[in-house]
C-alpha cells in the first residue's frame, strides 16, 4: 500500500532533529518522534513503516499519525502534543474560594477540636456555600499549593 503522507525534511529540519536525538535533553516521546521522522525521511533512509516500528518499538499506526501531523501541521505539531483548548474539568475553587480556604485553615479550630482536619475544612466550605461539594483530598491539594 502506498504511503499517504510522505515526509520530506529540509536540511535545517534534519539538523534540528538530529541534534534533538543526540543531545538527549528532550522528553522521551519528543525524541522518539524525532527518530521516527528521521527514519521516515524520503530524502534520507526512507524506511518502510514496519521497519521503523520494529526499530523504535512502537506501533505502525503511531508512525502513520506522526507522518500525518508532520505533513499537515508541521514539525512542531509532529514533535509535541496538542495543547488543550480548555481544561477538561473546571477547578472547584476560584481565587476567592482559595483565599477563604486559606483563611479558614489559619483560623481557630471549631469547639472540641485542637486542629482543623481536611474533612472539617471541606464540610465548612460546603456549609458556607463556597462550593457545592468538595472532598478532603481536594482541600489538601489546594492547601499544599499555598504551603
Image: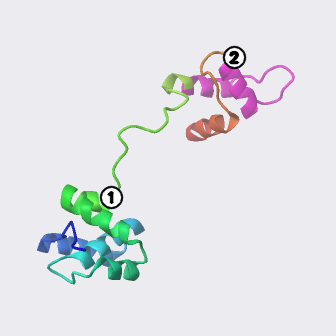
Q: Position of residue 76 (x, y in %)?
A: 25, 58
Q: Which residues are magenta?
A: 98-127
Question: Considering depth in this image, is 54 or 14 the residue closer to the camera?
Answer: 54
The residue to which callout 1 is attached is 80
Q: Secondary structure at mark 2?
A: helix
Q: Secondary structure at mark 1?
A: loop
The residue to which callout 2 is attached is 127
- Residue 26 seen in the current view: no
Which class describes the residues within 10 Å of circle 2: few (<14), some (14-19), or many (20+)? few
Task: Indicate whether residue 88 is drawn in magenta.
Answer: no
Which class describes the residues within 10 Å of circle 1: few (<14), some (14-19), or many (20+)? few
Task: Indicate whether residue 120 is drawn in magenta.
Answer: yes
Between the C-alphas of marks 2 and 1, the distance is: 44 Å
Image quadrant where residue 129 sits? top right
Image quadrant where residue 20 sits? bottom left
Give the main secondary structure, helix, strand or loop, of the magenta stretch. Answer: helix
The C terminus, quarter of image: top right
Residue 134 vs 24, above or below: the answer is: above
Image quadrant where residue 114 sits? top right
| First of labels 2, 1 by sequence position | 1
Residue at 21% x, 66% y is: 4
Amino acid at each position: 500500500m502506498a504511503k499517504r503522507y510522505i515526509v520530506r525534511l529540509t536540511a535545517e529540519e534534519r539538523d534540528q532533529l538530529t541534534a534533538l536525538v543526540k543531545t538527549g535533553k528532550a522528553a522521551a516521546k519528543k525524541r522518539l518522534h524525532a527518530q521516527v521522522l528521521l527514519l521516515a525521511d524520503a530524502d534520507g533512509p526512507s524506511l518502510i513503516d514496519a521497519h521503523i516500528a520494529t526499530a523504535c518499538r512502537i506501533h505502525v499506526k503511531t508512525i502513520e499519525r506522526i507522518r500525518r501531523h508532520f505533513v499537515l501541521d508541521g514539525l512542531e505539531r509532529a514533535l509535541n502534543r496538542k495543547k488543550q483548548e480548555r481544561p477538561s474539568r473546571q477547578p472547584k475553587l476560584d481565587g476567592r474560594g482559595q483565599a477563604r480556604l486559606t483563611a479558614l485553615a489559619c483560623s481557630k479550630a471549631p469547639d472540641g477540636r485542637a486542629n482543623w482536619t481536611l474533612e472539617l475544612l471541606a464540610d465548612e466550605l460546603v456549609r458556607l456555600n463556597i462550593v457545592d461539594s468538595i472532598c478532603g483530598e481536594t482541600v489538601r491539594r489546594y492547601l499544599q499549593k499555598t504551603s
